Amino acid sequence: MDTLMNTYGTRTLTLVRGEGSRVWDDQGNSYIDAISGIAVCGLGHSHPAVTRALCDQAGTLLHVSNLYNIPPQRQLADLLCEQTGMERVFFSNSGAEANEAAIKLARKYGAARGIERPAILVMENSFHGRTLATLSATGNKKAQEGFAPLVEGFIRVPYNDPEAVRAAAAQHANIVAVMVEPVQGEGGVRVPAPGYLNQLREICDQNQWLLMLDEIQTGNGRTGRYFAFQHNGIQPDVLTTAKGLGNGVPIGACLARGQAAEIFQPGSHGSTFGGNPLACRAGIAVVETLLNEGLIARAAQMGDWLLEQFRERLKDDAKVVDIRGKGLMIGLELDRPCAELVAQARERELLINVTAGNTLRLLPPFILTEAEAEQLVTGVVELIRAF
């Protein structure tokens, strides 16, 4: 009997080792990991800087509680604030927990303003996590099925539609925040219009709402800037990140500035493992490596090249509805469900995934070589043409 809960279905591939952009299975076969553990391993596998940091910290101090000062935690918080213009950080263990912190922060902000039953504006086709509150914020009915009653306090509007946000403002006096992904990852790599976030910033300012950006998937260099909001020249009030921050070590963070940075006080929120020495040493190694090795600019350049190649080589394929992306976050939307492409890609030594049913999603590591990028493009193009 399998002692694991059946939350991931039947898994036929067993991965046992990784190095750079490649992983190996228990039969000795190698694959280009073009999904990076779902946008986690931006530095690739077994990166020496992360390995050194983990080994050093494991031999020094793995864990103490947040009742005490943790120097790596403060150092990582300083690094993140320097890169974002944010002012304070709460560390968690995952993206869902970072978003939980943001949701609690927004509600407490509303309570401080005397707003009864404060609500957060969220988007259709969004994904914010699988805890009960973040699942309630998520715009995916399939993911929510069977978990009612969901947490109240979320008002949903279409993504990439500022007018729908303005209409909601006129209809609901209890809205206190907007929670949005700069690019919808699980929703099909949906890239909004260039000025969308700027308009959300204006609407939030006009209504005294918090602008809360979920950068769990888009953060830590994935889109070609440290965070995706930096393409727009704006500042959020609350910013959440995880995934790529630890390159495989579980860590999340909720960053805030201005009024939002002062909302949590002693007793407001907490975490046993959040921001422990081991996770924060991994985060420090990731941030410093991204900055020192020019990998964020590389993600932008490689992403542009991949998009150009896919668009050129698939321009005459009627099955392809759209090819879109930002940095190394790329979606190829087909005119039909295409989940079977995942297994077919393995035969070409590629690990990919399909999201939103019909969108092939690529999230390769930033250290992908030119030869590996060419192998990825050739393999995916052949897959789609034969499909």
Image (cartoon, helix red, strand yellow):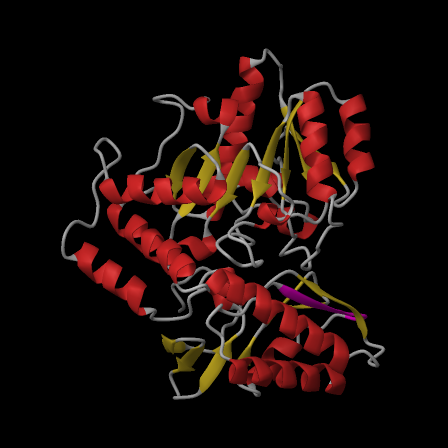
Q: How many marks?
A: 0
Q: Is residue 178 above or below residue 26?
A: above
Please state the horizontal and vertical placement of residue 77, each as a whole percent of the image. Answer: 36, 40
Which quarter shows the N terminus? Answer: bottom left
The residue lying at 63 percent from left, 81 percent from top is 377
Please state the horizontal and vertical placement of residue 3, each as a whole percent of the image. Answer: 38, 63
Q: Which sits in the foreground, 339 or 298?
A: 298
Q: Which sits in the foreground, 54 or 292?
A: 292
Q: Is residue 283 magenta?
A: no
Q: Which sits in the foreground, 149 or 225?
A: 225
Which quarter shows the C terminus? Answer: bottom right
Please state the horizontal and vertical placement of residue 362, each as a whole percent of the image. Answer: 60, 69
Q: Is residue 105 above or below residue 30?
A: above
One can see residue 278 in this view: yes
Can you tell which quarter of the image residue 318 is in? bottom right
Apparent side of residue 119 relative to residue 86 in the rendered image (left or right): right
Please state the horizontal and vertical placement of residue 14, each as a whole percent of the image. Answer: 42, 77
The residue lying at 76 percent from left, 50 percent from top is 193
The residue lying at 54 percent from left, 47 percent from top is 130
Residue at the extreme top of the image, as rendered: 114
One can see residue 249 in this view: no
Can you tell which quarter of the image residue 209 is in? top right
The residue lying at 50 percent from left, 60 percent from top is 296
> Mainly helix, strand or loop, the magenta region?
strand
**Stretch in magenta:** 330-336
Q: Is residue 53 above or below residue 207?
A: below
Q: Is residue 332 magenta?
A: yes
